[in-house]
Amino acid sequence: MTRNMEQSTRSALHIAFSVVGLISFLLVLFFNGSTNSPDLGIFSQPTGNVSDKFNTYITPSGWTFIIWAIIYTWMAVAIIYALSQLCRSSDSGPVYLSPVTVPLQFWVLFITNQALNISWLFVWDRELMTAAAVFLFLIVITNWLAMYILHSRLIQDGVPVELPRPELIALRVTMHNGLAVYTTWTTIAALLNLDIAIVYVAGASNEVASLVIACVLGALIILWLVLELTVLDKYTRWTISPGFTLVWALSGVFDNNYWRAPGAVPAVLGAVLGVACLCLLVRLVVLVVYVACPPAGRRSGSVDIAGRLNGGFSQ
């Protein structure tokens, strides 16, 4: 009886937080749309106007921000997939519980993240650059924690072995890679916002601040590749969207600043873009090699899709 009550409580909480997660996402879409409609009285100016006022030498070209449409579309698909688990059952029971692949902790972090997203819109609109940077870094932290929850859950307790192949692929394509695009972009945005605060609030040199932030970003890209290919391999092997997001964002930065930035900034921006492209290429080559020649005698904590494509699990 106690076990049934615990399961019923867990089920009710999961459903409730999933619905609240959907509502929070819809609110984010509403408030983001409102930034382009000052007549509503919610915001005083479009977010793009603020970017134009606080321009630095690592501000991307306007076309780069099209990625927000991709992010929100992908997130919408991910949420639809997660909610679909509430309506489906398998031989083991409800899909959202048997096994749990989108745990309650994820929804708590996601809802918090969406609230921070809305808060950032207001402080950005009021041109409070230090506060905006703080909120963006909080967004980044909740994103990375949510990434950890989703990816680590997938290799725990034999979860992947219980999942049908279509379910596993859907989870990785929608939830894992969708959240990874959002996480990568907000990480870049947080560094850009920090650059703005350093230049326009602290009064530092635009050239020096942009150089430092660009170098930090380049170092993080290399560090992430190393982690992906080593200690994080079993978690993130099939999460490849960060590399494409980095190349897109840095292409926009390079395009907007190569001809106007002074000193060594253009060369450094070109080098960082080159590093991002090279890291993406290495990442894809390693994945292709893994699929073509899965290592014999290796047991990972996650399902080996390559093995399934070849008719079974890797050993």
Image (tube, helix red, strand yellow):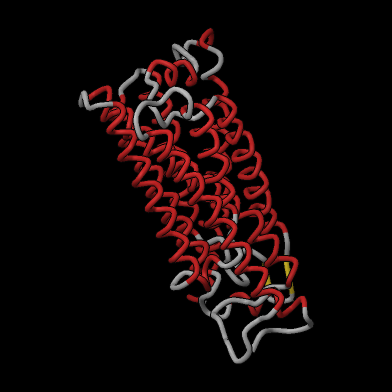
| Residue at the spot 58% in from the left edge and 42% down from the top edge | 22
Question: Residue 172 versus residue 78: which sits nearer the camera?
Answer: 172
Q: Tell me the quarter of the picture where residue 261 sits.
A: top left
Q: Tell me the quarter of the picture where residue 284 sits.
A: bottom right
Position of residue 302 relative to residue 28, above or below, is: below
**Residue extending furthest top?**
39
Q: Tell me the quarter of the picture where residue 26 sits.
A: top right
| Residue at the spot 61% in from the left edge and 64% down from the top edge | 238
| Residue at the spot 40% in from the left edge and 19% down from the top edge | 125
Position of residue 291 relative to residue 133, above or below, is: below
- The answer to whether any part of residue 16 appears in the image is no
Q: Is residue 268 left or right of residue 88?
A: left
Position of residue 57 relative to residue 280, above or below, is: above
Q: Quadrant of the C terminus?
A: bottom right
**Residue extending furthest bottom?**
297
| Residue at the spot 35% in from the left edge and 24% down from the top edge | 123
Q: Position of residue 177 (x, y in %)?
A: 60, 54
